[in-house]
């Protein structure tokens, strides 16, 4: 019998000379299989010579004593795994895996913790969010408005001129015990003479009196495009800016706030990566954004990728920037970068989430859906043909069924001329897609990427569309029954929080953060299937399902030790889950408690005034200590380099340091 042990030296196993070429070909083939990550356990029943479970390569790291949910249907559970060269070398029982222990192998005891594949957010705005993360006060996860106002008060006291106090999305009034918005009087009392902007989703924003002075808004200031300025009896702005169609008015106002220097934007992005790692994220798909131009606004993340400082895998899409001239964007970008360019930590995926602005139903659930202009069809036809001809995958924002129907009408025509076959294209959000529309998506080979915007904005949706429509927003059961590829993302960090566990909780319960159950029971998922949408689902969307999404031999060693027992804990506690150890490519990029010493060091905080130092992250539970002004003022801060429309400058501030 032919021996299949690749390094066997037993003479009795030698192949006759006339079959030598075939023998050595098979030997090399087996080496290639093992080197490529084929499970050695699957060959262990072959007899002849020494077991394949006696490895020739030692593991760099072994994890033992875990409760692993692999999401691999062929081996759904395990208690141990071994890592070598950034990938999973073996997975199974401790006895099986410890055979790979060498003299330099690090062994990590999981202490019976639940271990899952690293989470993958299939639709977020990480790159944009990273540039300003360190400057933002985050209300994500706070259970009390009074707590949030106290944070504003403290931050206003330590924020140096000309910077603003900023709360830019990621929260909802319904999460607060008070069940209401802040008032302008409360915001003004908390922030005083420090300019401040507090934005609620893409719905409205409050600008304090100091901010109005800086912006120069007065009774003669016209309403910005897409927004309405609330005015008092004398016609003066009160400070409330209400979006009429969605994001343009809010974002264009926010863009007037000073930014940090390029170096500090890189550092801010590193901190945002670490925050994502803390929540168990190891991969994201970045959906681009308005004002996020390539390559300029990708400079920070590209530098981190070049410097090998990535602690998360980022696949990015290119978002058309010039309304009416989108084809020019994509023609120019196609000469700069191609699909797949990059590496396993930073890679270009294609186009999205807007490939033409005219097709985007900019979503504000508090307002009626916008009207899609007639010019959309001609613009989308041109861009669709170009992208299909370049073989660029693409994704399109479509919340409403009427929008999706018109998009599909164009894509069906494009497909007849330039086939979309095999191109991983799809629609994102999809809250109100009808069965007929889903059938058209399936027939055209499309996919669906849903986000948990209903977690934060469900109350507004319910008020406008009623319980029957809300119970199928989005129609998860029908999508799954039709076999349409499906993934989930957060749409963080403005339209929702960037915390993926809020999204997982919504998939399982159908509840908003305010506790209202909107989603119908037929659309709810069990805990395993919800987790799949945040792991394997995203891996499929980026065409990486053979590399990540499950814990199995040959795939990336991207995994998370959870802070609680996800599969058995009370369901409403799932929102509060985080990681105690996050591993990406075999490297521990985040650790807490017992595992803190194993992790990479946190990036430095160069400026003590930044909100990130004390509360610029998702609050996992109510009652977290609010830092006091005295404690904050114990050390000085560097006066930052300011980047604004007029250039760069440094400012002193009345901080006494």
Image (tube, helix red, strand yellow):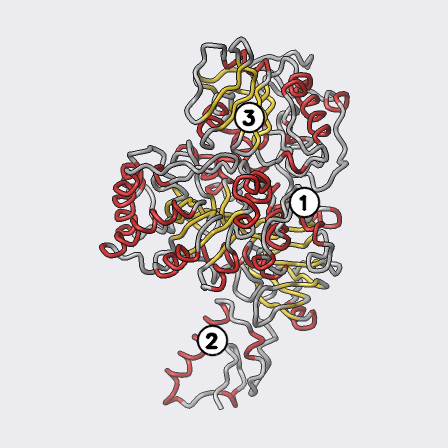
Residue 139: where, in percent of width, then height? 64, 33
Q: From the viewer's perspective, is residue 316 above or below residue 643? A: below
> Which of the 4 image quadrants contains residue 179?
top right
Q: Secondary structure at mark 1?
A: loop
Spatial distance from mark 1 to mark 2, Cα to Cα? 55 Å
> Which of the 4 image quadrants contains residue 84?
bottom right
Spatial distance from mark 3 to mark 1, Cα to Cα? 24 Å
Say if mark 3 contacts mark 1, CB within 8 Å.
no
- Graded by Cα atoms within 10 Å as few (under 14), some (14 to 19) or many (20 or more), the crowding at tag 3 reads many
Residue closest to the far top: 234
Q: From the viewer's perspective, is residue 366 above or below residue 119? A: above
Q: Which mark is residue 205?
A: 3
Q: Which mark is residue 515?
A: 1
Which mark lies nearer to you, 3 or 1?
Answer: 1
Spatial distance from mark 3 to mark 2, Cα to Cα? 62 Å
Which mark lies nearer to you, 1 or 2?
Answer: 1
Q: What residue lies at 66% left-to-right and 19% top-to-bottom?
A: 156
> Relative to the observer, which residue lies in front, 25 or 419?
419
Q: Which mark is residue 530?
A: none
Q: What residue lies at 55% left-to-right and 72% top-to-bottom?
A: 39
Q: Secondary structure at mark 3?
A: strand
Q: Secondary structure at mark 2?
A: helix
Residue 388: where, in percent of width, then height? 29, 51
Decide which of tag 3 and tag 1 comes sooner along the chain.
3
Q: Which mark is residue 30?
A: 2
Which mark lies nearer to you, 3 or 2?
Answer: 3
Decide which of tag 3 and tag 2 comes sooner along the chain.
2
- Graded by Cα atoms within 10 Å as few (under 14), some (14 to 19) or many (20 or more), the crowding at tag 1 reads some
If the image is split into quadrants, where does the C terminus sit? top right
- Graded by Cα atoms within 10 Å as few (under 14), some (14 to 19) or many (20 or more), the crowding at tag 2 reads some
């Amino acid at each position: 019998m032919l021996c299949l042990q690749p390094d066997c030296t037993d003479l009795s196993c030698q192949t006759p000379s006339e079959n030598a070429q075939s023998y050595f070909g098979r030997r090399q083939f087996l080496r290639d299989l093992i080197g490529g990550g084929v499970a050695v356990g699957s060959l262990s029943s072959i007899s002849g010579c020494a077991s394949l479970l006696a490895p020739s390569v030692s593991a760099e790291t072994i994890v033992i004593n875990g409760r692993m949910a692999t999401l691999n249907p062929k081996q759904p559970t395990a208690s141990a795994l071994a890592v070598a060269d950034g990938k999973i070398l073996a997975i199974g029982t401790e006895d099986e895996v410890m055979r790979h222990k060498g003299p330099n192998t690090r062994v990590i005891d999981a202490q019976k913790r639940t271990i899952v594949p690293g989470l993958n957010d299939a639709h977020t705005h990480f790159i944009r969010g990273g540039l300003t993360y360190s400057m933002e006060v985050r209300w994500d996860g706070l259970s009390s408005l009074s707590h949030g106002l106290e944070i504003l008060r403290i931050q206003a006291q330590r924020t140096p001129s000309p910077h603003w106090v900023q709360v830019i999305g990621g929260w909802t009034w319904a999460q607060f015990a008070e069940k209401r918005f802040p008032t302008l009087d409360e915001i003004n009392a908390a922030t005083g003479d420090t300019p401040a902007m507090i934005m609620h989703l893409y719905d409205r924003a409050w600008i304090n009196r100091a901010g109005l002075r800086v912006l120069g808004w007065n009774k003669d200031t016209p309403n910005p495009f897409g927004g309405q300025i609330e005015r008092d009896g004398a016609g003066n702005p009160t400070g409330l800016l209400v979006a009429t169609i969605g994001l343009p008015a809010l974002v264009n106002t926010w863009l007037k706030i000073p930014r940090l220097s390029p170096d500090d934007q890189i550092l801010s992005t590193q901190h945002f990566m670490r925050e994502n790692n803390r929540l168990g994220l190891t991969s994201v798909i970045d959906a681009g954004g308005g004002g996020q131009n390539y390559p300029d606004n990708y400079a920070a993340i590209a530098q981190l990728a070049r410097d090998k400082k990535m602690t998360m895998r980022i696949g990015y899409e290119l978002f058309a920037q010039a309304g009416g001239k989108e084809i020019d964007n994509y023609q120019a970008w196609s000469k700069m970068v191609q699909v797949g360019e990059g590496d396993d930590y930073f890679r270009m995926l294609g186009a999205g989430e807007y490939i033409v602005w005219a097709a985007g139903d900019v979503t504000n659930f508090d307002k009626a859906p916008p009207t899609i202009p007639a010019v959309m069809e001609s613009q989308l036809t041109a861009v669709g043909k170009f992208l299909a001809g370049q073989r660029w995958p693409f994704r399109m924002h479509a919340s409403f069924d009427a929008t999706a129907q018109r998009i599909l009408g164009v894509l069906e025509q494009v497909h007849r001329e330039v086939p979309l076959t095999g191109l991983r294209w799809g629609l994102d959000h999809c809250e109100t897609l009808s069965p007929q529309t889903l059938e058209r998506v399936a027939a055209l080979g499309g996919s669906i990427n849903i986000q948990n915007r209903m977690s934060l904005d469900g109350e507004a949706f319910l008020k406008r569309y009623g319980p029957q429509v809300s119970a199928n927003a989005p129609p998860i059961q029908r999508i799954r029954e039709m076999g349409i590829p499906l993934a989930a993302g957060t749409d963080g960090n403005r339209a929702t929080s960037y915390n993926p566990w809020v999204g997982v909780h919504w998939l399982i319960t159908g509840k908003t953060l305010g506790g209202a159950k909107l989603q119908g029971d037929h659309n709810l998922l069990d805990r395993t299937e919800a987790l799949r949408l945040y792991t394997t689902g995203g891996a499929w969307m980026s065409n990486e399902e053979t590399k990540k999404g499950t814990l199995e031999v040959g795939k990336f060693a991207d995994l998370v030790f959870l802070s609680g027992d996800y599969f058995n804990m009370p369901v409403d506690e799932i929102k509060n889950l985080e990681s105690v150890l996050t591993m990406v490519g075999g490297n521990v990029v985040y650790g807490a408690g017992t595992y803190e010493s194993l992790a990479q060091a946190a990036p430095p905080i160069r400026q003590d005034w930044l909100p990130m130092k004390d509360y610029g992250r998702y609050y996992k539970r109510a009652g977290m200590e609010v830092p006091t002004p005295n404690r904050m003022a114990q050390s000085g801060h560097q006066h930052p380099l300011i980047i604004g429309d007029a250039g760069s400058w440094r400012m002193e501030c009345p901080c006494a340091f």
